[in-house]
Structures are given as structure tokens and as C-alpha cells.
Amino acid sequence: MEQNLADLIASAEAKHNYDMSKMESDFQHKVMQILDRYKEASEDLRTAKEDWAARHRGAENEHKAEVHKLNTLHSLAMSAAKQRIFEERRNVEALKKKLGERLAQGAEEAEGELESLKASYRARIGAQREAGQQYKIENGIMRKKHVEMMETLDHLRSEKIVKETRCADLRRTVESFEVEISSLKALSLKKDSLMVEKEKRVGAFACYTHTTHRLIAYLFENDTYSLAIPFPPPHTTHTHNCF
């Protein structure tokens, strides 16, 4: 009886030792599988990090190139606009100068013609007075001279009307120049407002780009996507404050 009990105990211990060795072997096998999966996951993580870093560098370089392109285009547009504005202002100044010269010339011509008319009229008045005195002596001859004088006066009146018409034409020319100058000023103001609007749009685009980078950096710093995307947080170099 005791021998059978000792055999049973020995058999149970042998079975227990066998089961324990088998369990330990299975555990070590599972541990090795877990270690292999961990190594594969670490390698995948490293590859993903390198891929993300490469894509991030490419995106950052592309963004810098696009910003540089936009800045270059903006600088060219601003230079062209400033050149056009400068040329338009120079044209306006030239028109003003030309208008002043024409006004001065017209005023001098009108004044000279007026003085000439006055002198001619005075001379003819003096001649008419002398003719009047002669008329008292020679009635027939004076009547004829009176008719000539009246014709001369009619001619002078017609010349005066022509001069007044020329003065009116000069005034209309001056008014047309003033209207043209006003339209040029309005066009210049409109182009200035368009340039201001373009500058605002470029600033808004740069602000939007910077805000996007700041948001991505904030998400990575707070570990928001650490479970889904095992990427390191981006490092931005922008210092412009868009918030």
C-alpha cells in the first residue's frame, strides 16, 4: 500500500514536472513570438518615422518654394504697379504743365488781340472824328466815309464775335483737360486700392499656412494622434503671429 502511494506520488510529480516544463517551453515560445512581433513593430515604426520625416521635409521645402514664388510674384507686381502709377502721375503732371502753358499762351494771345483791337478801334475813332470834321465841310464825301465807317464797325463787330468764339473754344478745351485729369486721378486711386487688396490676400494666405503648421505642431505636442500615427512632432521655424 505504501509502495503504491509512493509510486503514485512519484508519477504525479513526474507528470507535474513534465507539465511545468511544457508550460515553460510554451511560455518561452510565446515570449519569443512577442519579441519578434515587437522587433517587427519597432522596425515598422522606425521606417514610418523616416518616411514621415522625408515627407515632412519635402512638404516644408515645397511650402518654402511656394512662399518664395508668391513673394517674388508679389514683388514684381508691386514694382510694375508702382512704375505704372509713377508714369501716370508723370503724365498727369505733364498734362497739367501743358494745360498751364496753353492757358498762359491763350491768355497772352487774347490780351494781345484785345490790345490790338483797342488800338485799331482808337485809331479808327480818331480817323472818324477827323472825317466828321471834314464831313462838316464836305457833306457828300463825309456821307460816303460814314458808310465806310459803318461797314468797318460791322467788320470789327464780326471780328469781335470771332474772338469771343475762340475764347469759348479755349474754355471748353480747358474744361475737357480738367475732366481728363479727374478721370486719371480716379484710375490711379482705383489701382492703389487693388494693390492694397492683393497685399491683404497674400498676407491672409501666409497667415493660413502658418496657422495650419501651428495646429499640426500643437496636435503632436499634446500627443493627440500618438495612438493612430506614430510620427514625431513637426518642428516649425515660422515666427509670424497669426492668432
Image (cartoon, rainbow, N blue to C red):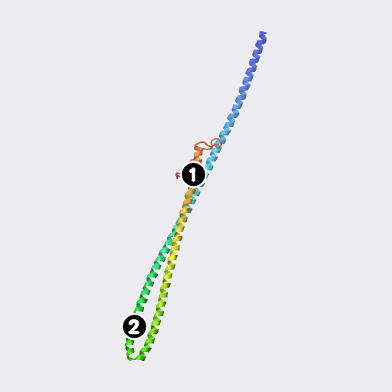
| Other residues around mark 2 within 10 Å, as few (<14) / some (14–19) / many (≥20) | some
Type of the residue with mark 1: Thr
- Give the residue at mark 2: 125
Picture layout, residue 120 above or below residue 41: below
- Give the residue at mark 1: 211
Nearest the viewer among 170 and 30 is 170
Q: How many numbered circles are shown?
A: 2
Residue 10 relative to residue 193: left or right: right
Mark 2 lies on a secondary structure that is helix
Residue 155, horizontal then vertical, whole percent: 40, 82
| Other residues around mark 1 within 10 Å, as few (<14) / some (14–19) / many (≥20) | some
Image quarter of residue 149 = bottom left
Residue displayed at 36% across by 78% down: 117
Mark 1 lies on a secondary structure that is helix
Residue 95, horizontal then vertical, whole percent: 42, 66
Is residue 197 in view?
A: yes
Is residue 74 in view?
A: no
- Report the mark closest to the observer, 1 or 2: 2
Residue 215, horizontal then vertical, whole percent: 50, 41
Residue displayed at 64% across by 13% down: 10
Residue displayed at 59% across by 31% down: 37
Residue 123, horizontal then vertical, whole percent: 33, 82
Query: For residue 229, which numbered disc appears in the image?
Result: none
